[in-house]
Amino acid sequence: MSNPSILILPGDGIGPEVMAEVRKVIDWYGAKRDLAFDVSEDLVGGAAYDKHGVPLADETMAKAQEVDAVLLGAVGGPKYDVLDFSVKPERGLLRLRKEMDLFANLRPAQCFDALADFSSLKKEVVAGLDIMIVRELTSGVYFGEPRGIFEEGNERVGINTQRYTESEIERAARAAFELAMKRNKKLCSMEKANVMESGILWREVVTRVGEEYPEVELSHMYADNGAMQLVRAPKQFDVIVTDNLFGDILSDCAAMLTGSLGMLPSASLGAPMANGRPKAMYEPVHGSAPDIAGQGKANPIACILSFAMALRYSFDQGDEATRLETAIEKVLADGVRTADLMGPEGGTPVSTSEMGDKIIEALDASL
Ligand code: NAD
């Protein structure tokens, strides 16, 4: 059987720097765990624009459709701010999400003990936090029609439409229940069924899908209360499922409970392919960080944790994903820090590649 395939799209700014550290980890799995991947690499974002005049070439899109998983670094940078909207680096990312139909966005918010002091909340509220937000990614108010700015009488009106079909809700809910089954069998669905018809339908469909998962304890919460509860007592949650708009806001809120942007991974999953694996793209939450690009200061952990998610959700290697997460936890517990993780007590930060090397050392020690 051939090896599972990965397409790496490093992108712009710190993207290539953090991705170089992921390459070390991928190579380690091939050499030390007999888990080899067929890795290819291509351009996205500004880098693709510079070469092809578009932020994602058709051939790259075709490759992304064929591989078992796409790993993306980050796109964008001040150099490209002047470009027309249609060829901005971010359009490359949106094209990937849209054409791969990646409808479930998984955003973990996990607080490593060694970094609990970085949260804006009290240490005891966040220490040990481990929640997963599943955000519906391809429908809802960001896509619904009609949309636009229209003339109405003697003034203008801005319109966006929240629209969800039952099947769109159902597939997002199913992704969340499947995740809950692999975690602590607890799922909270968030909407505003008190004021929105789409919320009423959302609640109905999630409840119906839940009948297929009797082991999962399902609860419902209004999204505004959900925001309060995430800040008040986030550890009450395990998996949260919500729509595109609320998910956008709630996942950013939950993520920041854990401290640095340099630590946050994400996965976007679509329907299963012929080999049973979901269409999938994994990427750090952060952007291309032009302010520190090219200086060896970027924290590669978000990107490496995104690869850990690929191990778990695309390659069915949950134990190896845990090995990698534990290695990262150990490196942090040993006090190894990139510049973004330096506390007020100071110290000497390690570079991007030194952080990658420390993680490889911890992986070696795990054998
Ligand atoms: P950003 O995430 O790039 O940076 C925000 C701040 O966090 C910066 O100070 C940066 O130095 C720091 N930071 C981010 N990642 C870090 C890491 N791994 N290690 C250490 N520090 C890190 O967001 P921004 O500055 O708003 O945007 C910069 C560019 O990135 C823009 O062109 C934007 O459009 C693009 N962007 C891309 C994505 C993506 O590719 N998914 C996401 C957000 C922003």
Image (cartoon, rainbow, N blue to C red):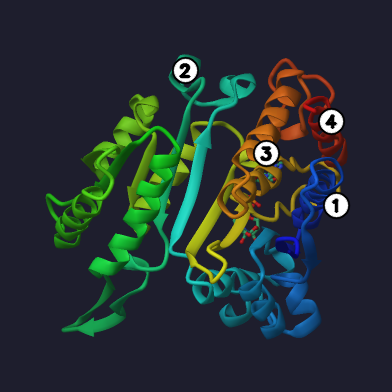
Find numbered disc 2 in the image and state the secondary structure of the residue it sits on.
loop
Q: Quadrant of the N terminus?
A: bottom right
The relative height of residue 225 versus residue 68 in the rendered view (above or below) is above
- Taking the image as shown, residue 175 lies to the left or right of residue 73, namely left
Crowding at label 1, few (<14), some or many (≥20) Cα neighbours within 10 Å? few
> Which comes sooner in the sequence, label 2 or label 3?
2
Q: Give how far apart the Cα atoms at labels 3 and 1 are.
A: 31 Å
| Image quadrant assignment for residue 296 | top right
- Taking the image as shown, residue 86 lies to the left or right of residue 82, namely left
Is label 2 in contact with label 3 (beta carbons under 8 Å)? no
Q: Give how far apart the Cα atoms at labels 4 and 1 are.
A: 28 Å
Residue at which label 4 appears? 364
Find numbered disc 4 in the image and state the secondary structure of the residue it sits on.
helix
Instruction: Give the residue type that dot 4 points to.
Output: Asp
Residue at which label 1 appears? 294
Q: Nearer the viewer, mark 3 or mark 1?
A: 3
Q: Give the x, y percent position of residue 58.
A: 67, 85
Front residue of this view, candidates 170 and 243: 170
Q: Nearer the viewer, mark 2 or mark 3?
A: 3
- What residue appears at the point 35 percent right and 24 percent down from the top-left corner? 233
> Which comes sooner in the sequence, label 2 or label 1?
2
> Which comes sooner in the sequence, label 3 or label 1?
1
- What residue appears at the point 75 percent right and 75 percent down from the top-left corner? 48
Front residue of this view, candidates 47 and 314: 314
